[in-house]
Image: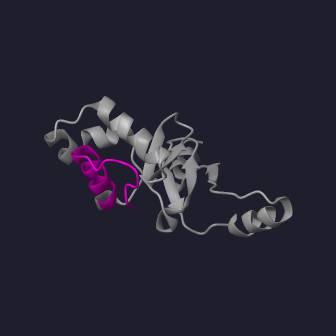
């Protein structure tokens, strides 16, 4: 996604390359720990500042998870997905099917409200935690 109205700095390029290469959501701390960012000696405060700017411009999507961490990912239809979150181990699994698309369209028609985005998190127990709990019962 182009950086419309933003200066294309080396730090932003490194961040965007990291997102393109990993293809998943990342926390600021995960970004800070990545080899490409470490070798560039980018400060954690610089990472947070750029993540805020990029998400504010719609280049990244910021999602707050139940563990209290914000995770960022590239914006765009290809990145649109939702999450299954294990309430025991906090494991996250994405799913691409969007059961809200039809509802969103219907709501826009009914209310005249232009919906610009949504997210869905479903909570439960992953297979591994279910097996662990059954073994300990």
For the N terminus, the image quarter is bottom left
**Residue at point 54%, 61% (across, down):** 81
Horizontal arrangement in the rendering, residue 71 relative to residue 2 (left or right): right
Q: Residue furthest front?
A: 5
112 or 15: which is nearer to us?
112
52 with respect to 9 (left or right): right
- For this orientation, the residue located farthest to the left is 39
Count of all numbered marks drawn on residues in the image:
0
Q: Is residue 40 above or below residue 113?
A: above
Residue 45 screen position, x and y as percent: 32, 29
> Would you say 42 lies left or right of 126 here?
left
Q: Quadrant of the C terminus?
A: top right
Q: Nearer the viewer, residue 95 or 135?
A: 95
97 up-or-down from 137: above or below: below
Residue nearest the observer in this picture, 92 or 12 = 12
Q: Quadrant of residue 113?
A: bottom right
Q: Which residues are magenta?
A: 1-20
Please tell me whether residue 19 belongs to the stretch shown in magenta.
yes
Q: What residue is rendered at 21% in x and 43% in y?
A: 37
Q: Position of residue 124 (x, y in %)?
A: 63, 49
Residue 72 image point, x, y percent: 44, 47
At 27% from the left edge and 56% from the top edge, which residue is drawn?
17
In reply to whether residue 111 is colored magenta, the answer given is no
Coloring scheme of the render?
A: one colour
Q: For this view, does 87 lie left or right of residue 37?
A: right
């Amino acid at each position: 996604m182009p950086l419309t109205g933003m200066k294309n700095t080396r730090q932003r390029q490194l961040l965007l390359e990291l997102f393109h290469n990993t293809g998943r959501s990342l926390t600021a701390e995960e970004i800070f720990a990545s080899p490409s960012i470490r070798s560039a000696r980018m400060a954690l405060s610089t990472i947070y500042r750029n993540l805020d700017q990029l998400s504010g411009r719609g280049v990244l999507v910021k999602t707050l998870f139940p563990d209290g961490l914000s995770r960022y990912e590239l914006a765009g239809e290809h990145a649109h997905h939702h999450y299954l979150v294990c309430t025991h181990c906090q494991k996250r699994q994405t799913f691409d099917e969007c059961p809200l698309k039809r509802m969103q369209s219907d709501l826009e028609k009914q209310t005249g409200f232009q919906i610009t985005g949504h997210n869905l998190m479903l909570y439960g127990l992953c297979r591994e935690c279910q097996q662990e709990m059954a073994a300990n019962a």
